[in-house]
Structure formats: structure tokens, C-alpha cells
Image (cartoon, rainbow, N blue to C red):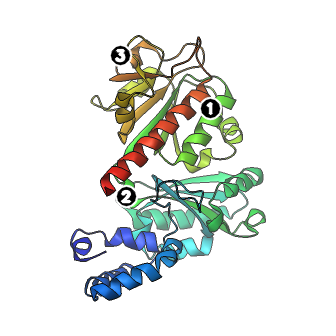
Amino acid sequence: VGPSDIISGKLEEYAFELNMPVENVSDLCIELATEDPSVEASREHQNESEFSGIITSRTETPYKSTGRLALQGVYDVHMCSIQELWEQVTYPAKLKYLVRVIFPRTADAGQIDSLMAAINSSRYPLSPSTVCMLPQSGWKGVIRNVPKTRRVSNAEESSCFAVTVYSTPSSSGKRRILVLLGLKYPGNVGTIIRSAVQSNLFSSVYLVDTNVSDEDINWYSLQNAPLIEIIRFQSTESFLQHIPVQSRMIALELSPRSLNLYSPEAFELLHDKHLYLVVGAEDTGTPINVLERCQNLIEIPSMSASVNVSCAFASVLSIINIADRFSLSERRN
């Protein structure tokens, strides 16, 4: 960090990453910027491991062998006591990134209502944070999906804690959206959403024309679904009316005009972070009216037949991960 970071208005982002007040980060920036270069180099070498522990959000080091976390994604998942959430109401700089709060259903409903009213008042004019209340079994499952370093011991049996989901400052304005269109089997929907959440590459999941219940989705996603925004559309027509006309849409579809998933062209297209990725039904695929809105189609080369839809999505997810990592490496070089 240095003077250019101060001027460019990144202090709030650093404050969020370091979990420090903005004024402390400002002092740190000035201290580092005015420090003797030789001392700064020594500090960098000495504190390399220390800073990797302070910044607990997803590391930007590709293929880091010492940890399981992927690239910094669109969400940052934490766990805290309800009392700590009350204290954050006085720190709006961090609350502006809070998009989702998950509570056990045993928590005091009146207290939760008051807390969320205070949080959303602090966030105004931003859209309100979403609240999710889960039964005990679902609450235990969600806790298991919080990164291990951020879990609180004994929280499974307590009603005094919450799981918080923040949008990361670096993901501002970037919205990859996964569209599941007409899928019929809960196992496929849950598995795909589980993969999407754990990849941390999608800001939302749109469920279009599906009767799979929320309970089944939570169950088959192993309680990953509560961690991401899920929006339902009753028909393909209502979905198409909702999205902007100029939106980039790519469908996973077998077609004469489909690009090979492993081609350079597909690689480049999937790196786009302003993207609707459409996955069609297990039997009928993607409806014609949606295909007509798609700028590109992508298929997975196979010997004779199509592959399971959740397996197909996993293949696409791998290419998106590689494309994002490759792009990061290019910027560094």
C-alpha cells in the first residue's frame, strides 16, 4: 500500500480485509509510504507469514500448497456472535458489504428483527441484507460450510451466533449469475449449487421453471444454498423479461453452433465476470427462446452422448477457475 492507494479511495477495502478501523489503516498506509526502502524490504520479508494470517479472506496466490482456499471470490463467509453484529452497527464501512445473515431458528425472533432493522438502517440507501432462519439440522450444516478458521466452537448448540456473508470489495459490480433452467431432479440442482457456492465465482443463482423445493435444495446442496442469493422465476418468459437486453448469456448446450469447452474462444468467454451462464434441463436442454437470446453456446466434447448435467457444470466450473487464474497471472507478469 502507498500514497496512490490512499488517493484512489481503497481505504475501506483495506479496512474490510484487515478488520481494522479506517483511520488505523490510513495511519498504516502513511507509515509504510514514508518508511525507508531498506527497512520496508526487511519488514516485507519478516512479516510475510504474519500478513498471510491477518488477511483471512481468500488468498490471491494461485495453486498455494499450504491452504485449501481458492482465489478471492464474490463472497466472504464469517461467523460471529449476535452481540458482535450489534457492535458492527456502529461501523457502517463494513456493514455496507453485508449481504446475508443466517441465524438458527431457535434465536430470539424479536431480537433478530431489531438487529436487522438497525443493520439495514445503517446500510441505507443500499438494498437490505437478506435474513435466513434455519432449523437446527440446517444450522449445523451451514456451520460446516464456514471456513474452518472462522468457525466458533460450540456454536452448533447455541442460539447466540450468526453466519454472515459479505460481498468482497474487489467483486463490486462483477456479477456472474448461474441460471438453472427447467431442472427436474433435486440431486442435480443441489449438487450444482453446492459446487457454485464452493467455487465462490457466482453472485446469484436463478432457478427458472423448476418445482424443486427450497428444503430439497438445502438438503441436496449440503446446506450450501443458504450462503448464496437464489431467485426463482416461474417461467422462461419472466426470466427473459427480468434480465437486461444487452446481457451476455452463454448456454451449455449441444448444438452445431456450440464452441468446444476447451477451445481458446470458450476460455476467453467464460472469463467474463458479467455473464449469465445457462444450464438447461436434463432431458430437453435449453428452450429455443432462451437459446435465441444467448450470444454463445458451449458444449463438452464426448464420445457419443451427453453427460450428466451436474458433471457438465463441474467441467465448465474448472475452465472458469483456470481462466480467472490465468488472467491473474498475466496481470502480475
Residue type marked 2? Ser
Residue drawn at x 49%, y 54% as measured from the top left: 75
On residue 189, the disc is 1
Q: Secondary structure at mark 1?
A: helix
Q: Position of residue 180 (x, y in %)?
A: 52, 29
Image quarter where the N terminus lies is bottom left
Asked which quadrant contains residue 40, the reply is bottom left
Q: Is residue 149 visible?
A: yes
Count the marks: how many? 3
Mark 1 is surrounded, within 10 Å at the Cα level, by few (under 14), some (14 to 19) or many (20 or more) other residues, namely: many
Q: CA distance from mark 3 to mark 2?
A: 33 Å
Q: CA distance from mark 3 to mark 1?
A: 24 Å
Q: Position of residue 72 (x, y in %)?
A: 46, 56
Q: Does residue 205 lie above or below 153 as drawn?
A: above
Q: Which residue is under mark 3?
A: 292
Q: Is residue 206 left or right of residue 112?
A: left
Q: Counting residues from the N terminus, which is met first, the one under dot 3 or under dot 2?
A: 2
Residue type marked 3? Glu
Q: Which residue is under mark 2?
A: 170
Q: Nearer the viewer, mark 2 or mark 1?
A: 2
Residue drawn at x 44%, y 38% as measured from the top left: 177
